[in-house]
Image: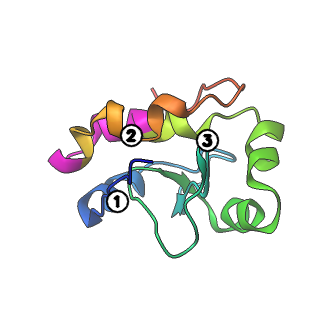
Amino acid sequence: MNKKKLVKSLKHLKFVAEYPCIICGSDSVQVAHIRSLPSGNIGMSRKDDRYTVPLCFGCHSKQHSMNERKFWETRLINPMEVAKDLCLQSPCKKVKDFNESTDYFKEGNYETRLDIIT
């Protein structure tokens, strides 16, 4: 099994925090890591900053309080697509230049729509 390298980037996290909450549209956001990746949970202590989305405090709390896949599915949002779009727009080169052959984006097959980030 290939071990995937974690990407850490304060520049990218600040960029993600400039967007409104992808659930309710609030401008007061936190950067939320997608914990339940398609290949399995990467855990609470090992977080890759590429897999982040902007959520307000309330929505972020709900994300942590329930099954994460159900959280996204009930809201009809594909967090992997949102995170990937943010990576492609990021001012951080190491985030923008991710290698799809070695990351989880290619596996992000949540069966939901995406209409948040344009």
Q: Which residue is mark 1?
A: 6
Residue 66 in percent (x, y) is at 83, 61
Residue at point 66%, 63% (across, down): 60
Total marks placed: 3
Distance between mark 1 and mark 3 Cα atoms = 16 Å
Q: Residue furthest left?
A: 93
Q: Which residue is mark 3?
A: 38
In this view, 75 is above or below 20: above
Residue 92 shows up from this direction: no
Distance between mark 3 and mark 2 Cα atoms = 18 Å
Give the SS element for disc 1: loop
Give the SS element for disc 3: loop
Q: Is residue 47 magenta?
A: no
Q: Which residue is mark 2?
A: 86
Q: Mark 3 is on which residue type?
A: Pro
Q: Mark 1 is on which residue type?
A: Leu
